Image (spheres, rainbow, N blue to C red):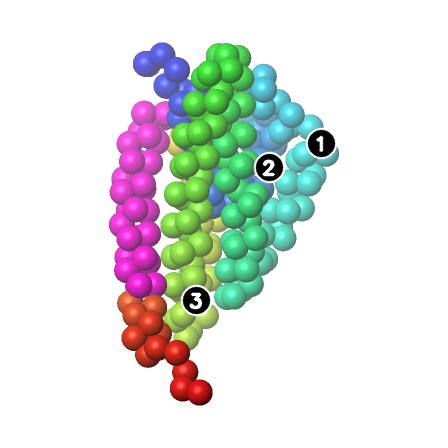
Amino acid sequence: MLPLLPEVALAAALAWGAGIRLYAVVFLLGLAHTLGWWSLPAHLEVLAHPLVIGAAAFMAAVELFADKLPLLDTIWDGLHTFVRIPAGAALAAAVFGDAGTAAAVAAALLGGSLTATTHLAKSGTRAAVNTSPEPFSNLLVSSAEDLLVPAGLWLALGSPLVFLGVLLVFLALAFFAIRLLVRGLRRLARPASRAGPPAA
């Protein structure tokens, strides 16, 4: 196995997962360490503290409920723009805490960017799905996200190289989705700009 490959995959998985289900990521890794299923790096062992696991479990349950309701999930995603991105950067940096300050800072920069991309793709896609008049598409997408995060973490821990390959495909799809969303927003803005100011 390539040097640092497991660490790179773990940092990428944490940053990616934080952009979708931050609290579930923290809870699952903390629980896995506590039960002896997998050992956290030294700088991430705080995730296994009972207070952290309890808080993460509570917030994951709240998010599980909020994410299933149209409009509320969009508000939740908007508010968590200020939570997920710095948290993803911090989690990625902690993986390389023993490798020196430079490595940790680089991991934070790359991890934060990855979290931001994932978060933007998720929140933008969900906002688009919410325009559908029927309620089932939102529930289906949210449930898929619930399964995607633990599956991604499991893959990153068990097959780091495979996870990184899948992540590249995910990022390509995310950039494509973001591009489509930006185009849609521009088209919505054009009629308003052409209409000009209202008559006095």
- Amino acid type assigned to the residue bearing label 3 in the image: Asn
Q: Which residues are magenta?
A: 157-186
User: In the picture provided, is 140 more to the left or to the right than 29?
Assistant: left
Ranked by sequence position, the earlier of labels 2 and 3 is 2
Q: Could you tell me how far apart the alpha carbons at marks 2 and 1 are, in whole angstroms? A: 10 Å
- Amino acid type assigned to the residue bearing label 1 in the image: Pro
Q: Can the viewer see residue 193 in this picture?
A: yes
Note whether 179 is above or below 160 in the view shown. below
Residue 10 numbered mark, or none: none
User: In the picture provided, is 136 more to the left or to the right than 170?
Assistant: right
Residue at 43 percent across and 23 percent down: it is 106
Q: Could you tell me how far apart the alpha carbons at marks 2 and 3 are, in whole angstroms? A: 28 Å
Note whether 73 is above or below 134 in the view shown. above
Query: In which quarter of the view is residue 138 placed?
Result: bottom left
Residue at 58 percent across and 23 percent down: it is 44
Q: Which residue is mark 2?
A: 27
Residue 130 numbered mark, or none: 3
The overriding secondary structure of the stretch rendered in magenta is: helix
- The single residue placed furthest to the bottom in the displayed view is 200
Residue at 61 percent across and 32 percent down: it is 31
Ranked by sequence position, the earlier of labels 2 and 1 is 2
Residue 126 horizontal/vertical position (percent): 42, 59
